[in-house]
Image (cartoon, helix red, strand yellow):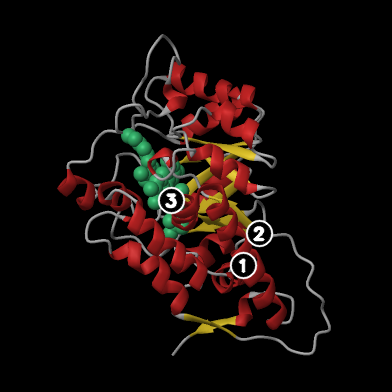
Amino acid sequence: MNPVLAELHDKARAVLDPVHYDFFAGGVGDEVVLAENEAAFRRRALLPRVLRGIEVRQDFPVLISPTAFHKLAHPDGELATARAAGTTTLVSSMASTVPIAEVVAAASGPVWFQLYVQPDPAVTEALVRRAERAGCAALVVTADSPVFGRHRRDLAHGFHDLPAGLAAENMRDLTGPGLRTIEMSPAVSWGHLDRLREMTALPLWVKGILHPADAVLAVEHGVAGIVVSNHGGRQLDLVPAALDALPAVADAVAGRVPVVLDGGVRGGGDIAVALALGASAVGIGRPVLWGLAADGEQGVRRVLDVLHDEFLHVLTLCGGELSRDVVVARC
Ligand SMILES: Cc1cc2nc3c(=O)[nH]c(=O)nc-3n(C[C@H](O)[C@H](O)[C@H](O)COP(=O)(O)O)c2cc1C
Ligand SMILES: CCCCCCC(=O)C(=O)O
């Protein structure tokens, strides 16, 4: 792991309420997949090409993955994250503690809205309209959560509700006065995705794909992009590491839409490995939360800056171009 990210993680652990730290850090079940997401990167090595004469000029292929409840990490919550994002795309969680309109107003770059399709179609549509009015540039439907994962750390702490004064603000006054709760629903299907595509002109991404056949279905259902993700090891503890699922998904998609990888990315070298294995960009979850908890807007900016700098350095050392043959198994 990049040492700056490790330092911010240590500081976050020290300043956060242990219950909230465990909410952010924890995974599902025995937390096997949580550990595997990072370990999968350590099982790979980069086999650089040399003497290519390429001077690296490359956009920063990183998005901020959607994570809930940023005010548990810092009083400025998602406003600090949005300010720190700069030109990096921020995928703002539906479970944000700041309303999406305020998140977009605080950001200088693109903001995408992450959506859990709600059992009540009127609530889903109201959320989509809210994201459109706010000026979001895309919708990201999270598909890996027909039910909420069982997080043993949260169960042990009895952590079920946000503290007084904090709420999932996007759920306020949606189809009537008051706050609605976010519901996960096993009834959500590809049909819901089709209805969303008809409902909005926003590009529609799907997040939480691991099976190549689902990636093909997603393309057939007209998505603008796919996020290969196991929700940071928070949904099903029996799935592969996100990185291990990436190559087959990338092959199945065959360049028809961009494929983003999230889960376990903790350094510039990890970004390079994911790109070489077929991702067009990576998403960053927990490191952003550690930066936010440790030092608010400055902390998030540090996370992004250090990843950018390290990625360009690794890319240069790799000869400036990444393809699948530059990743090998580490024996
Ligand atoms: C505390 C926390 C909250 C999360 N909340 C959401 C969410 O609201 N919506 C969503 O689609 N994914 C959510 N995720 C999953 C992330 O978007 C992402 O897939 C994951 O964190 C990536 O793994 P990483 O943390 O190892 O970078 C959450 C993850 C964490 C750690
Ligand atoms: C019932 C609240 C849902 C918040 C969802 C947050 C999330 O996805 C997570 O992994 O935590």
Spatial separation of the CA atoms under disc 2 and disc 1: 9 Å
Q: Quadrant of the C terminus?
A: bottom left
Please identify, in this view, whether the residue under mark 3 or under mark 1 is nearer the observer: 3
- Reading the image, the residue beneath label 1 is 275
For the residue carrying disc 2, how many other residues have a C-alpha within 10 Å: few (<14), some (14-19), or many (20+)? some
State the residue at coordinates (43%, 19%): 172
Residue 88 in the figure: left or right of residue 191 = right
| Residue 8 versus residue 161 in the image, above or below | below
Real-space CA distance between mark 3 and mark 2, rounded to the nearest whole angstrom: 24 Å
The image quarter containing residue 82 is top right
Could you tell which of marks 2 and 1 lies nearer the N-terminus? 2
Q: Is residue 311 left or right of residue 153?
A: right
Looking at the picture, how far across and down is residue 169, in whole percent? Answer: 44, 26
Identify which residue is drawn at 44% across, 12% down. 175
Q: Is residue 324 above or below residue 260?
A: below
Q: Amino acid at mark 2?
A: Pro
> CB under 8 Å between callouts 2 and 1?
yes
Would residue 272 appear left or right of 18 to someone viewing this image? right
Evaluate whether residue 44 shows in this view: yes
Above or below 261: residue 271: below
Q: Which residue is mark 3?
A: 293
The residue most toward the top is 176
Residue 14, quarter of picture: bottom left
* Residue 1 vs residue 120, the one in the foreground: 1
* Percent of width and height locating residue 103: 57, 33
Mark 3 / mark 1, whichever is N-terminal: 1
The local secondary structure at tag 2 comes to: loop
Could you say whether the residue bearing mark 3 is in a helix, strand or loop? Answer: helix
